[in-house]
Image (cartoon, rainbow, N blue to C red):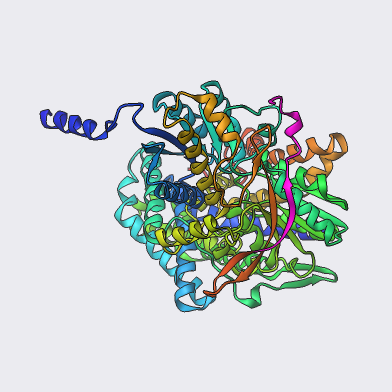
Amino acid sequence: MVLVEQSLNGLQFGLLLFLLAAGLTLVFGIMDFVNLAHGSLYMMGAYFAATFTAWTGSFILGVLLALGATLLLGIVLEFVALRHLYGRDHLDQVLATFGLILFFNDAVRLIWGPAGLALPLPAWLTVPVQILPGVFYPAYRLSIIVVALVVAALLYLVVMRTRIGMLIRAGASNREMIGALGINIKLLFTLVFGLGAALAGLAGLMQAPILTVQIGMGENILILAFVIIVIGGIGSIRGAFLAAIFVGMIDTLGRAFLPDLLRMVLSSAAASTAAPALSSMLIYLLMAIVLVVRPEGLFPAAKR
Amino acid sequence: MKKAFWLAGAMAMALAQPASAGDTIKIGFVSTFSGPTAVIGNDMRNAFELALDHLGRKMGGKPVEVIYEDDGQKPDVGKQKTEKLIQSDKVDFIAGYIWSNVLLASLKTAVDAKTFLISANAGPSQLAGELCSPYVFSTSWQNDQTPQAMGVYMNQKGVKSVFLIGPNYAAGKDMLAGLKSTFKGEVVGEEYTVWPSQLDFSAELTKAKNSKAESIFVFYPGAAGVQFLNQYAQAGIKSQIPLYTAFTIDELSLPLQKDNAIGIPGAQEWVNDLPNPENKRFVEDYRKKYPGLRPTYYGAQSYDAAQLINSAVVAVKGDTSKKDEMKAEMEKANFKSLRGPFKYGKNHIPIQNFYLQDVVKDADGQLSLKTVATIVKDDQDRFADKCPMK
């Protein structure tokens, strides 16, 4: 029973990471663009949702408006700033998008203040639901799992079954070639970036009611998103999906069961101190192993 | 180029100290002014500034200059800032410190330089015990004291078993150890989380729920306290297993915790409604000076730190080279503390009362903290015997 619940916790965390990583891997894979400010879009999604929910008084409406706003923000950001960096070195891109992180953090401080916001859930999402006889699970975490799975399925359909998706995949394998074939690659890039931004915003706003909405909330989780795209293979949605689930599971199950395992060999005090440190290392250990065995990631996008 | 040179010169002049050393009382203040816990540092600075206002911005007839430094909640940064304040700014006193791990990293620098350090919050067990120093005073508590009081309260309520959750750093370990030292029931489980990065407690809450413990005790200061209560309520555990806390619900987190905090008891040495006149004036003036904000225990302790420093400076009539006399004066705790009078133990940690606080709606319809009862009177920390000072 505990295992079921902990697995759901891991799955929920993994799926959330997938939403963040999906946008990142698309942008990195297709445009060859390193976007450190992806975490800022995650943060903006959460801030937008908190603000719009407070304005409209409706959680659903607030969330939908916030999604639109993050999509728009992503498109504007791409159009105004990032477009000019595509031809540049990765280091320039890192520097510029790092600057954007600082910009967004201070913009948020100016607009919303330093204290952070709360995004309260509607009453129907705060009750635990019975998923198996005797096993209760928070309704909201369950709805994150459902929404993320639906989004993942839609993303799969769009990328694998539509013309736009074909172009995206082609762009990930060979950027110059699809440009040469007369595809409007600028428009494609803007669309992909907007999509990535909306996905990051979705992850941020879904995480917001669990955590608080605060400045810099996207920075820690962005590191995990990078780990995921490295494990999954850059540019691969399927890779990002599987790697995200792996990472979510390892993180949660590590935290859940490692202390008890360690207590079998260590003293109780030493085990409870070592376990959190060790379980947060497991993910990076996985990444290191993957890098040694398959340097291109588990599911690399088709060769260039 | 030439213009830039003159401009730089003018700026340097403007930045230069208005008075040479000796004419002012210099105080360094290290706290967190950036990142998610910056609200705590701001509250401490607000209260410290209010104390200076109340003192006419003078101590022992000399003007006071305070230099605030941001530790970013990182021990290494805190140590650097402490070094900078002591070695290049040559402050007479250094105060502040929210985080036990930051204080422990910075301690040696202050003690080696024989600069008085006043901790306005952090109270690691080492500081009260083997690392106690004639140059270090606390206007807060030793970490274990508050959860110890909570343990006493849980015994009174007849709680039989508890599941402990806290962050994996110096203060987190002290807090859980403190509770265990007084709680008479069974400790069913004990979980530590990665600090300060871990904000999702789903795995720990699931374990607590399935542990069949009668109660949960947590220590999550700052924003983490908001997140914990959120997830505790969402998981539906609030209606099943009651929660007991230390330093998890305060006036900064309450506006974000909202109804999640109702009915969850905490222990504290200071609550905003303590009836002494100094405290009434402090709370009133704070709310007047900083509209929309309410002071927390972090602020109250910082206010006391300014008063403690003032008592020492007044005793030597502004001559801060008389360190022994200042130390002797501070050991008397000869000032009107906001929590009411207290005495110092030989390790310079207050011997003081701890109160039970509850969340209620106040006259303005806002959620606020209220003193319900005195849990322990004149409590001394359990590490004082390990302190070699007399």
**Identity of the residue drawn at 46% across and 63% down:** A47
Q: Is residue A127 above or below residue A219?
A: below
Is residue A197 in sight in this rendering?
Answer: no
- Residue B266 position in % (x across, y down): 69, 58
Is residue A291 in sight in this rendering?
Answer: yes
Taking the magenta stretch, the answer to whether it contains residue B2 is: no
- Residue lying furthest top in this view? B112
Question: Which residue range is magenta in the image?
Answer: B371-390
Depth check, front residue: A83 or B170: B170
Instruction: Name which quarter of the figure residue B348 lies in.
Output: top right
Q: Is residue A228 above or below residue A90?
A: below
- Residue A269 position in % (x across, y down): 80, 38
Depth check, front residue: B323 or A56: B323
- Residue A221 position in % (x across, y down): 56, 49
**Identity of the residue drawn at 58% across and 42% down:** B139
Depth check, front residue: B29 or B224: B29
- Residue lying furthest left in this view? B2
Q: How many marks?
A: 0
- Residue B382 position in % (x across, y down): 76, 38
Taking the magenta stretch, the answer to whether it contains residue B376 is: yes
The quadrant the N terminus of chain A occupies is bottom right
Instruction: Name which quarter of the figure residue A129 lies in.
Output: bottom right
Instruction: Name which quarter of the figure residue A138 lies in.
Output: bottom right
Depth check, front residue: A211 or B31: B31
